[in-house]
Image: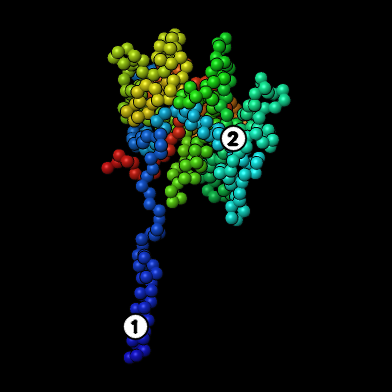
Amino acid sequence: MKNLLKTSFAFMLLLLVMSCGSRENGQLLGVIDRPAWNGINPYGMVYIPSGTLHIGNSDADISETHVQRPKSISIQGFYMDETEITNNEYRQFVYWVKDSIAHSILDNTYESEDGSETYIDWYADIDWESEELEEMFYSGNNKFAGKKELDVSKLEYEYQWFDWKRAAHDKGKSPRRSFIMEEEVNVYPDTMVWVRDFSYSYNEPMTRNYFWHPAFDNYPVVGVNWSMANAFCYWRTKLWNSYAADGVISEDFRLPYEHEWEYASRGGHDLAPFPWGAYYIRNSKGCLLANFKPGRGNYPEDGGLYTVKADAYYPNDYGLFNMAGNVAEWTMSSYEAGAYAHIHDLNPDIRYDSKDDDPIAYKRKVIRGGSWKDVMHFLQTGTRHWEYEDTTKSYIGFRCALTFLGRSIDDF
């Protein structure tokens, strides 16, 4: 009897210990103590809900039949910058690269505890008069008028991306490293575009002032190619994640895909030819609704001779500014004339990471929205156009997107 009591007591004690030591209580409850996720609200971005979009040429656009065949698609909810990335926002990236190079030269770094990583000590002061930093400035006969000026050719930044599609088709046969792509780019905007883009035209003041002068801080950055825009998104993601609460990170900032951009530009009005929903480029008072080239070159009629501030004019019904005009915008998508004939109807997109020796046609990326120097046709929400990915122009900028995680906010 005593032995039975001892055995019963030991079994009860074991159950008690198991209960105190584990909150699962033998049940399938998933991993305990997972971090909470209440969504995010990135500064300067607006939420675009999931929805359906009808793409393709309008009844009046017969010439685009072969490159814009009608199709119904669905788009996942996402965030998008309410304005194009401005000079001052992009300058934050340029200054970060500049300072990181200076810190590295001055050896203002420290290692992780295991010695596997080296970090920049951002709290260390930078003595820009130090002889060690002379290599970052123009010297000798490269100096102009005796000024001490930063040699912008030194502002190189390496970014990475993962080739998910190639990894998916590989089915685990190759090491992960073979799908991690890297590229080094110079991040300083090509300010010479203001002269190079126009023959027999005096635009040197824009070259000298547009990116650095405070007068243009809130104007959209231009002179950035597709790779530079992607490098900015990569840097922005790392900056965001470095301040992520509880170590919970979001999706990466990126360029919007072509039809995300089109869906967002319509502001919730399917088949709307312009972001404001109407069929006309002027309001009831005759005022132009975007920054473009009216008529045959009356540039200032809309209020801006070149670009205008990124939040000029009224936003569309999603709260997005200048989805038509001001600057055309890079998208993530590769351009293919017949894409609409075979793209998927769920988050459609065509991606291709071109190689140096690829035919030049493989290096075309979709741009959308039209610009300050374009005629009205390019301002329409459904108009497709392209530019080579390594090209910089005085009329192409970009804005970022961020995929929404979880069920769409407006799904009930």
Residue lying at 40% horizontally and 15% vertically, measured from the top left: 303
Q: Give x and y (percent) for residue 261.
A: 41, 30
Which of the two residues, 239 or 230, is positioned nearer the viewer here?
239
- Marks 1 and 2, how far apart at CA: 72 Å
Tell me if I can see residue 410 in this picture. Answer: yes
Label 1 crowd bin: few (<14), some (14–19), many (20+), radius 10 Å = few
Q: Is residue 137 left or right of residue 381?
A: right
Q: Quadrant of the C terminus?
A: top left
Between circles 1 and 2, the one closer to the viewer is: 2
Find residue 17 and report its image quarter: bottom left
Q: Which mark is residue 297?
A: none
Residue lying at 62% horizontally and 29% vertically, measured from the top left: 150
Q: Which mark is residue 98?
A: 2
Residue lying at 65% horizontally and 44% vertically, measured from the top left: 107
Q: Residue furthest left?
A: 412
Which of the two residues, 22 or 97, is positioned nearer the viewer here?
97
Mark 1 lies on residue = 8
Residue lying at 53% horizontally and 34% vertically, measured from the top left: 93
Badge 2 amino acid = Lys
Which of the two residues, 297 or 334, is positioned nearer the viewer here?
297
Q: Give x and y (percent) for residue 82.
A: 40, 30
